[in-house]
Each structure stands twice: as structure tokens, then as C-alpha cells.
Amino acid sequence: MLNKKNIKKKYILDGFYNFGKILDEKKCLELKKYINKHRPCNKKIFYKSENEFKKKGRFTNYSPGEKEHNAIYNLNLNLEFIENSTKFKNAVQSIVGKDYIIKKKSIIRSVPKIMHPNWVLNITKDVGRPNVNPYVREKYQDVQYFQNVDYHQDMTRGQKFVTFYVYLDEVSNKDSPLKILKGSYRFGATHYPHYIRPAIEKNHWYYSNLKGDHLKCEEESIYGKSGQVFCFHGLNLHGTGLNKNKSPRISLRYLIKSNKNNFSKSCHATTYKFINGKIVENIKLKNKIYLQRLDRDIKGKFLKTGTSILYNEN
């Protein structure tokens, strides 16, 4: 039985809650096996060379959509054992309330460096959020692939959702566990790359809104078995380090929002009382283009900005 009072208290404090292994481990592993069979992950999914990528690739529309070009729908995956699970539904309701809406769900793969072609490693060197989907052949882009991901926010366009993660793998320190900077949602939306600096105290970071305010945030790495479920605020900074294992880490990511009739009564709604900042932060360029991210040019190409999350791994 979930203690909703304790969940609310911790979620408001940290913008994060770990529900533990609440899903059927055997079914999660079977799902993982099925995905790996029908969407194998190896060097062959990438373009053969940078020249081939320049001819055939693109920096737009390369990630899974809400339903279009999304392997969950392309493979007709049956996720009822998750979404109709009483424990999963109770977990989601404890954060966003009843009659919630699943905005998007997708398959996420953390790909070990040994599975990347050398030309991809070269082109993504010093890129803070090396989303490698642009370099993957189009037919495989219905899964989200990444190398590592610097601290960032999911909620950049003002939609008030919560990210729920389901581990299909057992995740240890070598499997690029998700890392959360607890309570960082309180500054609202800030531009990526975010201004964070490591504290002397281990696993702590100072986060600035560049307006004279600083938060000292504890970093929590999330380990667990297949069937582990956790959630975090769409404005909480989070990311992953490098996958040092020999196989990809595979997870499901759900973006879930409250039913508009129940939002004001939800635990998630309460967090907005503690946000000192904007929910959407844009920079307006001279040509009237608005940006939430400063690590991409106007054509979408990734810029080399370095990375914070690998600081303790070097």
C-alpha cells in the first residue's frame, strides 16, 4: 500500500520519487527480449560513414513521435501488464491524480561506446547531449538512442507533465543509471547548457539561475532490477553517464500529465507553488527564432559545448 502522504512530501521536496520494483520482472525481461529481437542494436543500424550521413541523414524529425515512427506502435507492443497494473496506476495517480493522460511513451536505449562507429564517436565528442538518432538509419529511428546525456530538463515547452521511467534491465553503476539533481525543478525552466558546478561535497552540485540565486542539489543515481519504476518533475535536471557495459540499457519512458479537472488537486500541481522562475524560457534571436537550447544551431545541428555529467567519471 502506497503512503500518499509520504510520497507527496518527498516529491515536493525532491521533484522525484522512486517506487521500486513494482512491475512483473519476468514480463519486463520478456518485453526486453522481444524488443532486442525486432530492433537489434549494433553498428549496422548506423550510417556507414559521415559522408553517407551527410547525403541521407538529417537533424530534424529523427526521434520517435507520440505515435508516428514509434516502435511501441510499429511493433504493436502489448504494455497492458504495465499500464493496467494496479501498482503502476496507483503510483501514477499518487503524483498526477486520477484519469491521467499518457502524453507519450517511447523506448530508450543507452548505447555503449563500443557499439558506435568511430565516425559517430568523433562527431559527438564534446557534445553535451549526444542524441545519436540523427546518425541512425531512418528505419531504426523509432527507438531513442543516446550515448550519454548531460543534465537537462524534459519539460521545455510549458506542458506540465511528469516523466515516469520503467527499467527493463537490471541497472548497476556500469549501465548508465539515470541521475537526478533533486529539487532542481524549483528554478523553473532554464536554458541548456544549464549553469551547474560540482560542489566539494561528493554527489552534490550548485545550480544557478544566473539571476543571483543558487541551489545546492544532491545527485541521486537510480539503480534497480527489471521492473523498477520511478518518476521525476519535468523541470528537474537529470541525465546519464556512459554505458560501460557491453550491452545497451533499455527502458521505457512515459510522459504523463494530469487530467485538467484533477490537476489542481494533484501532488504535482503543488510543486508549482515552489517554483521561482518561468515555466517556459526562450531566447529570441534577431530572425525571430525562439530557442530553449543553446547547444544547437538554427538548423538543428549539435554544437560542442562540453558536458558536466561526466565530470566525476573522468
Image (tube, rainbow, N blue to C red):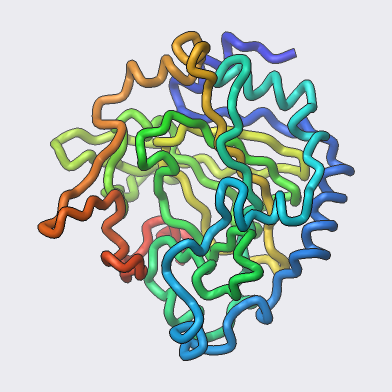
Residue depicted at 44% across the width and 34% down the height: 182
Residue depicted at 56% across the width and 20% down the height: 95
Of residues 290 and 199, which is closer to you in this image?
A: 290
In the picture, measured across the screen, residue 56 lies left or right of residue 98, that is: left
Query: On screen, 80 above or below 45?
Result: above
Q: Position of residue 51 (x, y in %)?
A: 47, 90
Furthest residue to the left? 286
Q: Position of residue 71 (x, y in %)?
A: 69, 56
Of residues 72 and 25, which is closer to you in this image?
A: 72
Q: Quadrant of residue 203?
A: top left
In the picture, measured across the screen, residue 290 lies left or right of residue 202, that is: left
Query: On screen, 95 above or below 280?
Result: above
Q: Quadrant of residue 304?
A: bottom left
Residue depicted at 51% across the width and 31% down the height: 162
In the picture, measured across the screen, residue 268 lies left or right of residue 276, that is: right
Quadrant of the image containing the C terminus? bottom left
Q: Position of residue 59 (x, y in %)?
A: 42, 69
Of residues 167 and 298, which is closer to you in this image?
A: 298
